[in-house]
Amino acid sequence: MIITTEIQTKLETIIKKLNNAQKVLVISDSSMVDEDCIYSGLTLRWLCEHLGKTVDNVIFSRINDTFAKKKDVNLVQSLFPDQVDFNQYDLVFLVDSPQWTRILTTKAAEIHLLYGKDKFVLFDHHIPEDIDADLGNQSINYGSSSTGLLIYRTLFKALNITPDLTCAEYIYRTVLSDTQCLRVNSNADTFEFCAEFQKLGVDHQRIVEEQSEVSKNAMDFFAYCLSKTEYYPEIKCTVLYQDAAFVDYCNSVFGDSWREVEMLSLYKESFMRRVTGFEHGLIFYTRNDAEKTKVSWRSKEYVSVDLASILADLGFKTGGHKNAGGGAVEKSIEQIRNDFENL
Ligand SMILES: [Mn+2]
């Protein structure tokens, strides 16, 4: 990663804030609890403690049982925003999220009103959205294989700090998780990092094995998703509609567990951009509101069909990365199916 003068200026601003801070709060992305957001948060925790500061790590969403068992995840508190007194902290790191409401939930506007935005600093590798626009010099929002790697390449380098093995493993996990063990979103910078950190003692194969392991329930759910997938060869898309029938079946067989992030990860990683002749994999789903449909997609690197414009035509507002993202529209899933089939 090239440190431009723009990034340099931002780092100077952020380091000044960090030097003046005694109590730091780290908030990880609340909308998608994954190893990047959690271990990037723990990386910042390690750094702050290394610099003699006190740190709290929080996430404003539930951490499920499978995730909670991973190494040091117990250091992250799962809270509601109104349980946090932001006045207690001199500095608040926001991690792995481009959007205020994704990280601070629907309480974002309220929190801004109460505490302002001056304490916030962002580290994120998604396509920039409102947080970056609001924070200016207090935002490090650039492309990178993971937010953890971005933090290492910018803040750690600027402070000239080498992580110990515990922290090195945190950062390594963020990279393997967001690149699906170096299969996607990887470049020379990513591989250089991996070589460097393996030399620091990180056990690559152990982390790959751990991250690749799935429960039998997740495997059964994967098989069901495959059986329900529809193929649209004209636009090179596969689609899984998680409609009422899908939801009913999953509720009866898997209980609540199928909504957990790990349950869909096998489908996303092993199916959604792998079928010959199909460039994009989509999932349409609804949460609490039946009149609002969400989309999650994965795309191959080299494509001929422009998925972004298809989704825009359907009315979706989208965000994320180039090859992976999500969005929402104020329409029912039946309406979306109908619109999609008429494309
Ligand atoms: Mn990430």
Image: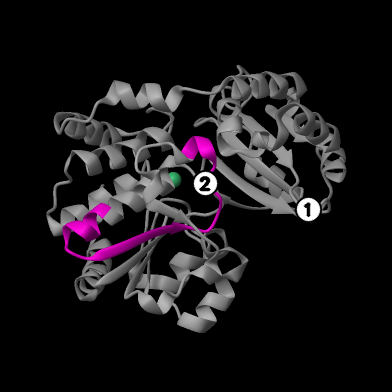
Give the number of the mark in front: 1 or 2.
Answer: 2
Q: Which residues are magenta?
A: 46-67
Q: Which mark is residue 227?
A: none
Residue lying at 53% horizontally and 27% vertically, measured from the top left: 269
Dot 1 falls on a residue whose secondary structure is loop
Pinpoint residue 5: horizontal percent, then vertical percent: 23, 64
**Which quarter of the figure is the C terminus placed in?**
top right
In this view, 109 is above or below 169: below
As rendered, which of 197 and 247 lies closer to the eye? 247
Residue lying at 48% horizontally and 38% vertically, measured from the top left: 67
Give the quadrant of residue 226: top right
Residue identifier under label 2:
63
24 left or right of 197 in image: right
Residue identifier under label 1:
292
293 left or right of 20 in image: right
User: Label 2 is placed on what type of residue?
Assistant: Ile
User: Label 1 is placed on what type of residue?
Assistant: Lys
Give the quadrant of residue 257: top right
Residue lying at 66% horizontally and 38% vertically, measured from the top left: 259
Dot 2 falls on a residue whose secondary structure is loop
Local crowd at mark 1 within 10 Å, few (<14), some, or many (≥20)?
some
Circles 1 and 2: CB atoms closer than 8 Å: no
Q: Looking at the image, is mark 1 or mark 2 earlier in the sequence?
A: 2
On whether ligand 1 comes within 8 Å of the CB at mark 2, the answer is no
**How many numbered discs?**
2
Pinpoint residue 211: horizontal percent, then vertical percent: 42, 28
Q: Quadrant of ligand 1?
A: top left
In this view, 315 is above or below 226: below
Residue lying at 51% horizontally and 69% vertically, measured from the top left: 83
Q: Is residue 63 magenta?
A: yes
